[in-house]
Image: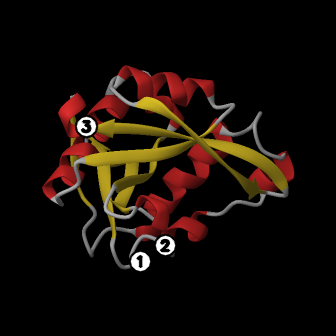
Amino acid sequence: MITIRKLQPADDRWAVGRIYEVSWKYTYKELLPQEYLDNLSAEQWANRLDMSNRYSLIAELDGKMTGTASYGESRDVEYAGQGEIYSIYLLPRYTGKSYGKQLISAVIEQLHVLGYKTIFLWVLEDNFGAREFYEKVGFACSGKSKKAEIGGKTVTEVQYIIASDCE
């Protein structure tokens, strides 16, 4: 049975960062430059976990970290006062087993506890699997998008949004 809990001070930040590293290399292998993916490291994410106003959840199965999600107030001034899901990742072998649904539900619940009625996230436009997942759990594409550069490649991110009165 999967357990979802808040990141604790004693948790191994490198182990959490490793979930990001492995997930990125798997998820984005067709979407981002391979050289960029090959050079990712767990430390890149481990160092961000304790940033102020950033919260993280950990998914565990039989005591082993299998997924993570980070969230908090919008990083974009344009969406001030809204909650943002910064990231949600599972190790590849744990996808497709409803663990992602449980993890995102827990993130939404935590953002509601923090007082956010509207919650959004950004997803790569070409990440059709993730987009389908977000739609299945109640998010809708807002029609807003933005350009970003990741690994030297310009990509388009689309915004997905869910409001508490739409649940």
Which residue in the structure is indicated by mark 1? 51
| Quadrant of the image containing the C terminus | top left
Query: Looking at the image, which residue is at 36% across and 79% down?
Result: 52
| Distance between mark 2 and mark 1 Cα atoms | 6 Å
Say whether marks 1 and 3 touch (CB < 8 Å). Answer: no
| Distance between mark 1 and mark 3 Cα atoms | 23 Å
Which residue in the structure is indicated by mark 3? 105
Toward which corner of the image does residue 16 lie, by quadrant?
A: bottom left
Instruction: State the scheme by which the image is colored.
Output: secondary structure
Query: Looking at the image, which residue is at 51% across and 75% down?
Result: 47
User: Please, what is the three-letter code of the amino acid marked with disc 1?
Assistant: Met
Residue 153: percent from left, percent from top = 83, 51
Figure check: 45 above or below 51: above
Residue nearest the viewer, comparing 164 with 43: 164
Identify the mark nearer the N-term, 1 or 3. Answer: 1
| Quadrant of the image containing the N terminus | top left
Identify the mark nearer the N-term, 2 or 3. Answer: 2
Figure check: 167 above or below 152: above
Q: Is residue 32 left or right of residue 122?
A: right
User: Please, what is the three-letter code of the amino acid marked with disc 3?
Assistant: Ser
| Distance between mark 2 and mark 3 Cα atoms | 23 Å
Say whether marks 2 and 1 touch (CB < 8 Å). Answer: yes
Q: Residues within 10 Å of mark 2 (few under 14, many from 20)?
A: few
Helix, strand or loop at disc 3?
helix
Q: Is residue 118 left or right of residue 139?
A: left
Residue 48: percent from left, percent from top = 49, 72
Which residue in the structure is indicated by mark 2? 48
Q: Residues within 10 Å of mark 1 (few under 14, many from 20)?
A: few
